[in-house]
Image (cartoon, coloured by chain):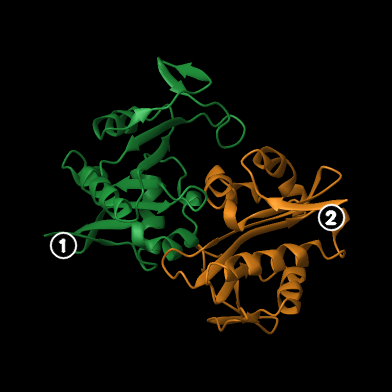
Chain colours: A green, B orange
Amino acid sequence: MSILRHLEVKDRSTIIRVVDEWWGGRPMAGLLPRLFFEHFQPTSFVIEEDGKLQAFLVGFRSQTTPAEAYIHFVGVHPGARGKGVGRSLYEHFFEAVRQLDCTEVHAITSPVNRGSIAFHTSMGFEILPGDAEVDGIAVTTNYDGLGSNRVQFRRYLEK
Amino acid sequence: MSILRHLEVKDRSTIIRVVDEWWGGRPMAGLLPRLFFEHFQPTSFVIEEDGKLQAFLVGFRSQTTPAEAYIHFVGVHPGARGKGVGRSLYEHFFEAVRQLDCTEVHAITSPVNRGSIAFHTSMGFEILPGDAEVDGIAVTTNYDGLGSNRVQFRRYLEK
């Protein structure tokens, strides 16, 4: 049985152990220090099936711009892809931040991550203008330190 | 003249460039992805002297436990130490989160960082119980991934 619930600190050791593998060997665990598991639980979720982690989403409401929510990190077990678990997590997040009076959601991804770009587009995100183009996609160069180009997404939330 | 102001996204490139050096060569920049510069400005500050960055503090209010504030990262230019700039940043942060109805502030540091432990103690933080001791200091082992021991601090705020 699938269960969607809030993220907890105890999920951290499980997630840290699997996340690089889920991301095809890219080193991602460094993007998930403990603070994300402790302080953003109201807008962070996991999906379990029969007690085993299938997917997770870490997001929060911007404290600079409270009408904006930000999705920091999403991971889906490779064996669970194509079944709508990512979609379920995103829809749950949209609902949670809508209740906090957010009117838009932001996210970023790497230009090489075509699956992520297609997913965000299918979830109603638009790609924001950048300062360069990679294979026809607008990217922001040096988004997060030298050489880190990122595609920026925005999705408005219905009232 | 010194100026204390809110952190802005434009500070990111300056900070990323100097922070490893300020921390004595430890690789710290990975702990400062752009999201911290974008989304936690109300409780993040820099001190400049004659337009040059002297120190910065990145902190936020916990969204899980709104009465709790968390100091994520603090850096002080080696040439500006011992002049109270760290103290000024912390006191400004305490005041900012007190106005958000926070009643306590949390922070962590590495057990090797004796200067940080002494600073936090002098700022009224207590060291929270851990699951081990290093040179007489309570530490939490594996706080943030395998092998990362941390000293945990808490300071209650006066009403």
Residue depicted at x 83% and y 65%? B84
Q: CA distance from mark 1 to mark 2?
A: 52 Å
- Label at residue B78: 2
Instruction: Please determine whether, in this image, residue B8 is positioned above or below residue B65.
Output: above
Amino acid type at mark 2: Pro
Residue A85 image offset from top left, x and y in percent: 20, 46
Q: Which residue is mark 1?
A: A50
Can you name the residue that lies furthest to the left here?
A1
- Label at residue B17: none
Amino acid type at mark 1: Asp
Can residue B35 be seen from the camera position used here?
A: yes
Instruction: Please determine whether, in this image, residue A138 is positioned above or below residue B48.
Output: above
In the structure shown, which secondary structural element does the residue marked by tag 2 occupy? helix
Residue A38 image offset from top left, x and y in percent: 44, 65
Residue depicted at x 36% and y 48%? A102
Instruction: Please determine whether, in this image, residue B139 is positioned above or below residue A95.
Output: below
Residue A98 image offset from top left, x and y in percent: 30, 50
